[in-house]
Image: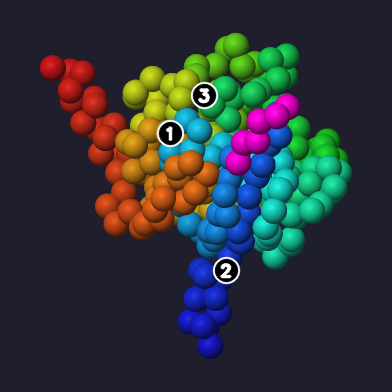
């Protein structure tokens, strides 16, 4: 009985798209950014969406992140059909279900790390004391409790991205959606952030990462490749890159 329940949890679909498409009409020009994309992501998966510019990966990320709606097809997020929701309904789903991590961090410059992390909790209805306690715990989980009262300009790039990850996690979302999370980071800091993602995955978080970089995609345990608005391939990555080993190799190399 227990093993059946456990298996069900492992295979529970968080993301399920069926023949979704996205068409943009710009004057006399019609652009089909997505053409009949059908994919699913199970709870606890670590997936990378990869493709060159114009492949449709950013459009797919926007739809999965409820920042946009498909022109056609169906999108079910955590058992809720969000395909034709209103803007207000999508905003509520975003705050509850999705934690965003952006390439440019998107932190409020005049707010402390703690205040930035606590921001989503305001919309979720937490009291100030509850927000402070939960935000501090989340900062602690990403190793930044000692920087809680620093503003973004007092933090390194890696620390700012950790604050952004903490902000994404503070509402206990169904998905952590990361758009080029290492795009603005140096090599060593990139390894640190990818190691943090690996730790979050090992704790059961569902991670969807969007990237155009092959080496970054290889940290994920499954890689979905897009091209010309279609899924070109969808494969399990049996040998994901180990960020801790990469960091160690980099440190040894820089000593030479």
User: Helix or strand or loop: what does disc 2 sit on?
Assistant: loop
Q: Which of 79 and 167 is in front in this view?
A: 79
Residue at point 70% right, 65% down? 79
Left or right: 106 as drawn, with respect to 142: right
Badge nearest the viewer, 1 or 2: 1
Pick the quarter of the image with the C terminus. top left
Earlier sequence position, callout 2 versus callout 3? 2
CA gap between label 1 and label 2 equals 30 Å
- Extreme residue toward the bottom, this view: 1
Residue at point 71% right, 40% down? 67
Estimate the x, y position of residue 230 in percent, counting from the top left.
49, 49
CA gap between label 2 and label 3 equals 33 Å
> Hey, which quadrant is residue 138 in on the image?
top right
Badge nearest the viewer, 3 or 1: 1
User: Helix or strand or loop: what does disc 1 sit on?
Assistant: loop
Which residue is disc 3 drawn over? Answer: 159
Estimate the x, y position of residue 198 in percent, counting from the top left.
42, 45
Q: Residue 75 carries which label?
A: none
Decide: is 226 above or below 249: below
As for residue 168 lying within the magenta part, the answer is no
User: Helix or strand or loop: what does disc 3 sit on?
Assistant: helix
Name the colouring of the figure. Answer: rainbow
Which residue is disc 2 drawn over? Answer: 12
Give the magenta range.
Answer: 27-32
Which residue is disc 1 drawn over? Answer: 52
Q: Nearer the viewer, residue 29 or 63?
A: 29
Q: Is residue 165 visible?
A: no
Decide: is 81 above or below 35: below
Residue at point 67% right, 57% down? 73
**Tally of marks:** 3
């Amino acid at each position: 009985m227990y093993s059946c329940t456990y298996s069900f949890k492992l295979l529970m679909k968080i993301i399920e798209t069926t023949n979704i498409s996205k068409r943009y009409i710009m004057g006399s020009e019609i652009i089909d950014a997505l053409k009949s994309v059908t994919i699913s992501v199970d709870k606890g998966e670590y997936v990378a969406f990869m493709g060159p510019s114009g492949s449709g990966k950013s459009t797919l990320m926007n739809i999965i992140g409820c920042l946009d709606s498909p022109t056609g097809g169906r999108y079910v997020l955590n058992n809720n059909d969000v395909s034709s929701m209103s803007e207000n309904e999508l905003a509520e789903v975003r705050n509850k279900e999705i934690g965003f991590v952006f390439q440019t961090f998107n932190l409020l410059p005049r707010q402390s790390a703690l205040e930035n992390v606590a921001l989503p909790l305001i919309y979720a209805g937490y009291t100030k004391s509850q927000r402070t306690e939960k935000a501090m715990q989340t900062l602690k989980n990403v190793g930044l409790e000692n920087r809680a009262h620093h503003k973004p300009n007092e933090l390194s790039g890696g620390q700012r991205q950790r604050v952004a990850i903490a902000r994404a996690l503070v509402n206990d979302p169904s998905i952590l959606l990361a758009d080029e999370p290492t795009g603005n980071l140096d090599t060593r800091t990139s390894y640190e952030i990818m190691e943090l993602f690996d730790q979050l995955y090992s704790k059961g978080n569902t991670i969807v990462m969007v990237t155009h970089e092959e080496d970054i995609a290889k940290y994920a345990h499954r890689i979905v490749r897009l091209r010309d608005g279609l899924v070109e391939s969808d494969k399990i990555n049996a040998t994901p890159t180990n960020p801790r080993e990469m960091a160690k190799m980099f440190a040894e190399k820089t000593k030479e």
